[in-house]
Amino acid sequence: MKVVAKPIEMAAWFTRDGIPHPIKFRIVNEDESYTVIKIDKIICTHTEKLAGNCMYVFRCQSVVEGIERIFEIKYEISTCRWILFKI
Amino acid sequence: MVSSNRIIFHIDVNSAYLSWTSVYNLQHGDTLDLRMVPSVVGGDPRSRHGIVLAKSIPAKKYGIQTGEPLFSARQKCRDLIIVPPMYDLYIRSSNAMVEILREYTPYIQRFSIDECFLDFAGTENIYKDYIELAYKIKDRIREDLGFTVNVGISTNKLLAKVASDLEKPDKVHTLFPHEIREKMWPLPVENLFMVGRATLPKLNKMNIYTIGDLANHDVEILKASLKSHGVLIWNYANGIEDSEVRSCNLPEVKGVGNSTTTSFDVADRKTAHMVLLSLVETASMRLRNLGNCCRLVSVSLKTSSFVNYSHQRKLLTPTNSTRKIAETAYNLFDEIWRGEPIRHLGVYLSELCSSEFYQISFLDDEDTEKSSRLDKAIDAIRLKYGPKAVMRSVFLHSGLKPMMGGVTEDDYPVMTSML
């Protein structure tokens, strides 16, 4: 996996305790078209608190353009932003 | 009650501002670790506020010093990376660290934004081995929060502070009284807390170059030349210090002040008055927040040729009204200013007393009750909707900030010279 740190548009659901569960997201390609990726499986999650900044980290697995890939997405609590961190 | 066999930890974040910025950038996908390359945290180099606030260890090797202008830092190292400060991030990082520390002891003194004293009095049965505990805390901060700290262990705050400074980064050091001779005395005397650039030349003149020289000097001679400060640093050099780990870092507020270095030279009276007003706005709000009135107002200024002067006046009756303080500040300014361009302006309010009661005076020129209600209303609006919610119309289109001074809106743990 390589660090890409790209902002993404996310559809997610939240539990009653406020824990996010990502469902699918889309990224803007260079030609400004969208690629939608459905999250097939969340392998593991953890929270990180680096420099006091809380983020949920999800390691997921999806089929992207016919290839099964593992990637990492992050949700930053202070800004409510999702990023595709590593793929 | 201060017992003689206390265990005090001093936790010090290694190049705090720089580490925190670096960890934040890495968390957001930056691949460059600022700690590994020559880099500094500094103000915005485009405005004139550009000085080095923090430096990485590689930047230190180029001789870059904290506090020097960015311009000269860049001359020392051409590939220097300069990042702007992010105070809200620093406060968040510092709070996260204190939160972790609180799990180990309730006795914590936040000495500054990146330094804490921890007292482990009465925990002998919980923590068997303090060195192990120090490593645990240090490693936990590194794992959870991503930055490194130094831990100094000793029996008082001063020795713990010296210990944490011995070798960086990411280290644990002890400096117990029996280790003073071996670990502290060979250090240069300027490494001692409270020996700064004013004291150092005086000590060097007395042939004192190391902490050991100072410790073994005749205290009476030091007292004669440096007064009580001489006794204080002699005690420090001998590891004598017994202050408590206070949960509130600031002992007692003796005054409230604000100052600013303007990004342009102030050359006319009206602009200077506006800068003073904006400083008084924040200072008097803090004064009211403390529940105090002041009896002494002082104004200081620095000209473009770096000449300082100041002027102060005692008021007939104590006050905390923005208008009254500002008017006094204007008068003081008009009396001292000789027309030269100004770089820096400051206002300081002292001789505080409680604002619970107010002695009405025949000489009051305003309805104090009314103006205090106005100040109260404005403070409440600013607290609720932010400092920009209400401002004086004089600042409209002036390019000046209606409220100046202070670091951020949040409570920023300030530095103090008192342990």
Image: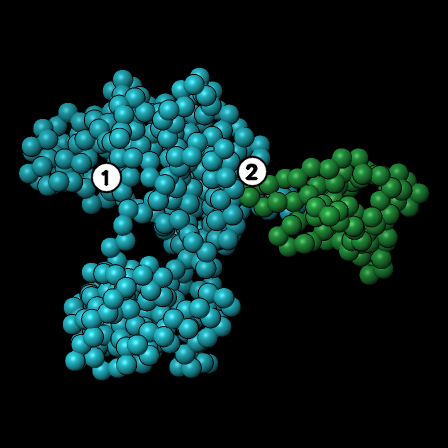
Chain colours: A green, B cyan
Toward the viewer: B115 or B357? Answer: B357
Q: Quadrant of residue A70?
A: top right
The N terminus of chain A lies in which quarter of the figure? top right
| Residue linked to disc 1 | B195
* Earlier sequence position, callout 2 versus callout 1: 2
Q: Circle 1 marks a residue in which chain?
A: B
Q: Circle 2 marks a residue in which chain?
A: B
Q: Residue at x 24, y 69 (%)?
A: B358
Looking at this rendering, what residue extends furthest in the front direction?
B357
Relative to B191, B135 lies left or right: right
Q: Residue at x 39, y 34 (%)?
A: B107
Marks 2 and 1, how far apart in space? 33 Å
Q: Amino acid at mark 1?
A: Val
The image shows residue B338 at horizontal and vertical percentages of: 19, 75
Q: Residue at x 80, y 57 (%)?
A: A28
Above or below A77: residue B144: above
The image shows residue A68 at horizontal and vertical percentages of: 88, 38
Above or below A34: residue A23: above
Relative to B295, A34 lies left or right: right
Q: Amino acid at mark 2?
A: Leu
The image shows residue A59 at horizontal and vertical percentages of: 76, 38
The image shows residue A24 at horizontal and vertical percentages of: 83, 50
Q: Which mark is residue B145?
A: 2
